[in-house]
Image (spheres, rainbow, N blue to C red):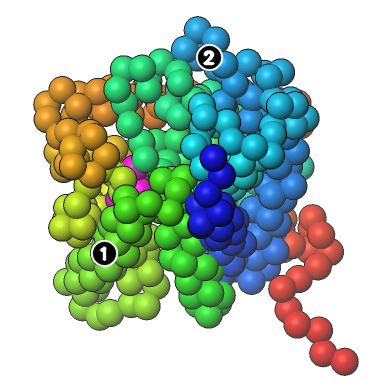
Amino acid sequence: MIVHGDVAFMIVSMVLVLIMTPGLAFFYGGLVERKNALTIMFQIFIAIGIVALLWIFGGFSLVFGDDIGGVIGNPLQFFAFNDVTFTVDLRYSETIPFILFFMYQMMFAIITAPLMTGAFANRLTVSGWVKILILWMILIYFPVAHWVWGGGFLSKLGFVDFAGGAVIHITSGFGCLGGIYVLGERKVKNEKGPFNLGLVAIGAGLLLFGWFGFNAGGTIAAADIAAIVFTNTGVASASGMIVWLILHVMYAKKASFLEAIIGAIAGLATVTPASGYITPLSALIIGALGALVCFFCVEFERKMWDDALDVWGVHGMGGLLGILLIGIFADPRINGVSAGLHQFLIQALGAAIIGVYSILVTFIIFKVVDMTKSIKVSEEIQRKGLDQEFFGESYETKMD
């Protein structure tokens, strides 16, 4: 039976998740140099159109269609809205129309691959990214989402991921490493820092705002557990922000507006997979641990490879840590999942499979696409700026 309150709650949650994609574009756009801002924002915004079409024409089926061998869903089951009804489908929800579930899950699919663009900032062509985006969704996101959320082999093992720590953050945060290896280091690095912290702040604000729908909407109902997830989201971002800022002050001997924002995002990325299985006090601890671990992972990766905007250190490692901490902090009173060695080992196995698969397949995708036509931006274009090269436009405001 359709419950109108649940419908309203899920529509709001869906919009909150959607607004995170423009938020990510503004966040990354402000972090790069002015001459490259439009390019990275375009690479993120274009996913709204491309991924939505992929979702309609087979993607949703591959994730939530009837299971085939524990690996993928039936690709034709919901193709082009086939059987995506306006009524309840009890396999997926009890109180909202099936088409609303379809739309909510689409918003998760849209934002996943764009998270990677920060790792490749200033050295990946626009046409190359479009090809990679299509292949990455088909070969990585859709299968992994099925393994975890669509009745695939990991879910049958007992692996859990409430709102995307593995499906979203590990796939993008670890997958980007395969792309970085193919692209190599930037020839021209941004030595000046973010060109527009105001734009970064707007983007971060939208991400923080949207994250409540991102996590709490996973309950698929305006139920008591939604309040717990909502609370867990808020307290983890708070503890993540403060712990990260303290660490930065200890190292740099001064505060940083940007570092405080990054800390909040690290806390959120870490609590995301666990948010529906833990108490608020555990969420507070997880947010702090996320900031602590991600802070040092970012320091490590800056010495090892060229992840321009620290995608692996924040999203990849945050998602991985959150997945593992389910095995330590899960409380059966919240959602029936109990912490313990057995659950921890299942979580570790699932995270390892998804992480390794994401790195290897992303590497193959980048390598194959680069072989057909180079996806690497030349040093000359990096110096000139990607916006002028690819769009003939600039972030500058034109005055009459």
In the rendered image of this protein, does residue 169 appear above or below residue 365? Answer: below
Examine the rendering and report whether any part of residue 221 can be seen: yes
Horizontal side of residue 20 vs 127, given as left or right: left
Give amino acid for label 2: Asp
Look at 28% across and 79% down and name the residue there: 255
Quarter of the rendering containing residue 257: bottom left
Taking the spot 68% from the left edge, 19% from the top edge, the residue there is 77
Please indicate whether residue 385 sits to the left or right of residue 244 in the image.
right
Q: Residues within 10 Å of mark 1 (few under 14, many from 20)?
A: many
Q: Tell me where residue 160 appears, x and y as whole percent.
A: 33, 31
Which stretch appears magenta? 269-273
Nearer-the-camera pick, 44 or 274: 274
Residue 313 location in percent, x, y?
A: 35, 49
Q: Is residue 301 rendered to the left or right of residue 337?
A: right
Residue designated by label 2:
67
Task: Tell me if label 2 and label 1 are in contact, CB under 8 Å.
Answer: no
Q: Earlier in the sequence, mark 2 or mark 1?
A: 2
**The N terminus: image quadrant:** top right
Is label 2 in a helix, a strand or a loop?
strand
Q: Amino acid at mark 1?
A: Val
